[in-house]
Image (tube, rainbow, N blue to C red):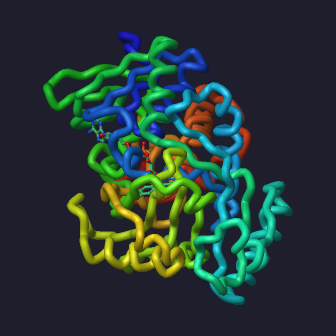
Amino acid sequence: MIAPTYDVAIVGGGIVGAACAYECVQRALRVAVIEQDVIGGGATAAGMGHIVTMDDSDAQFALTRYSQTLWQQLRPELPANVEYEQCGTIWVAADEDEMNEVLRKHDYYTRNGVPAEVLSSADLEGLEPNLRKGLAGGLLVLEDGVLYPPCAARYLIECALAKGATLYSASTVSQIGRGRVYFSNGSSLSAAVIVNAAGAWAPALTPGIEVKKRKGHLVITDRYPRFVRHPLVELGYLKSSHSLTADSVAFNVQPRRTGQILIGSSRQFGAERKEVDREIMRRMLQRAQSYLPGLSETSAIRVWTGFRAATPDKLPLIGPWPADSTVYLATGHEGLGITTSLATAKLIADQITGNRSAIPAEPYLPSRIRTPEHANA
Ligand SMILES: Cc1cc2nc3c(=O)[nH]c(=O)nc-3n(C[C@H](O)[C@H](O)[C@H](O)COP(=O)(O)OP(=O)(O)OC[C@H]3O[C@@H](n4cnc5c(N)ncnc54)[C@H](O)[C@@H]3O)c2cc1C
């Protein structure tokens, strides 16, 4: 038997693949990263970069909170172009029903050690004077933050390369399995473990996984420093991100260090083309203006789209793929992959090296999803 060239070959140089490479080299593994395009150019370039603790389920909470603490630990070494700011999130409640959700969320977060403050209508107006008047209040989650995802991915890859990882750039993988990575140019390499971190394209390499593209639009404005001071998200966002069928838009804006305002967001299934959908964008901007009327006076300078990788149970697929013991999955992060990339990488590296993880890995294991391809595996 010839020993494999690499301990780990990672397909995909988005934030998830980059984080996996960063973590695997810390464990002294021989790592290859294969990227068909530029590092951080897929969904990672399209994302908002909100590092956010979420509590749709205990498993989602555990992964987002763990990863957020990992980002906080990494923060002192991040270069300035990653633009990490711990500015908190304000969940905006429009009415008393949504205020009840604020109270529920506040209770959950504080019970689980996440600093959060309930805001009255007046508090909200004081913190964010450009919001429309008469909103019921909100929840300020203090340790949430924002960063610039493509530079974060590039930094993680550069660290991995400095520690001996090999980057195969402009290289498209056509097939993976049984310890081999096959390139579209006919060559191949061997690795003990292959991590499929190809984001929304992961099913092309691992047929049978239920990951669907979920399209999103974002708009960025010219510079309007302090027009908004925190990431602002309507509580209705939770309903829109939960829907697995309908197209939806929600108020979700973010201040950037440059003074620009990033405006989101939309969710669409079955929209496979990357072109901007004017109707969705119109609905998204209308929603944002209904919360921030002054936005109508600002100039947008760029609009783009990206594809989230969505799973049916809204949790990512992290760990070994039951149909092939050499293949691991690190995909399906939907709208939280920037946040959860570092925790994903820790779980993957722990599984490869046989270490115990800081949080239970079971909720994210691909084996939870039984498909015909591996029903007998
Ligand atoms: C509009 C929008 C807003 C978002 N906002 C946030 C947010 O605020 N916070 C948050 O946490 N998340 C957010 N997300 C989600 C986040 O962007 C993704 O979950 C994350 O970027 C996924 O990273 P990834 O590395 O898995 O995938 P990607 O970044 O898509 O990387 C996959 C890489 O694999 C490469 N690849 C694919 N197939 C092959 C192949 N055959 N051979 C070689 N290379 C291949 C691709 O070129 C790509 O570079 C948002 C997403 C969108 C679309």
Residue at horizontal 49 percent and vertical 73 percent from the top: 294
239 is higher (above) or lower (below) than 22: below
Residue at horizontal 38 percent and vertical 38 percent from the top: 40
Front one among 67 and 262: 262
Residue at horizontal 49 percent and vertical 77 percent from the top: 293
Q: Is residue 232 visible?
A: yes
Residue ranking furthest to the left: 185
Front one among 253 and 106: 253
| In the image: residue 261, left or right of residue 53 | left
Q: Is residue 318 visible?
A: no
57 is higher (above) or lower (below) than 100: above
Residue at horizontal 66 percent and vertical 86 percent from the top: 134
Split into 4 quadrants, where in the image is the N terminus?
A: top left
Q: Quadrant of residue 114?
A: bottom right
Q: Quadrant of residue 187?
A: top left
| In the image: residue 114, left or right of residue 320 | right
| In the image: residue 8, left or right of residue 112 | left
Q: Position of residue 2 (x, y in %)?
A: 36, 10
189 is higher (above) or lower (below) than 99: above
Q: Position of residue 225 (x, y in %)?
A: 54, 54
Q: Position of residue 55 (x, y in %)?
A: 67, 64
Front one among 54 and 218: 218
Residue ranking furthest to the bottom: 96
How many discs mark residues in the rendered view?
0
Q: Position of residue 255 (x, y in %)?
A: 54, 55
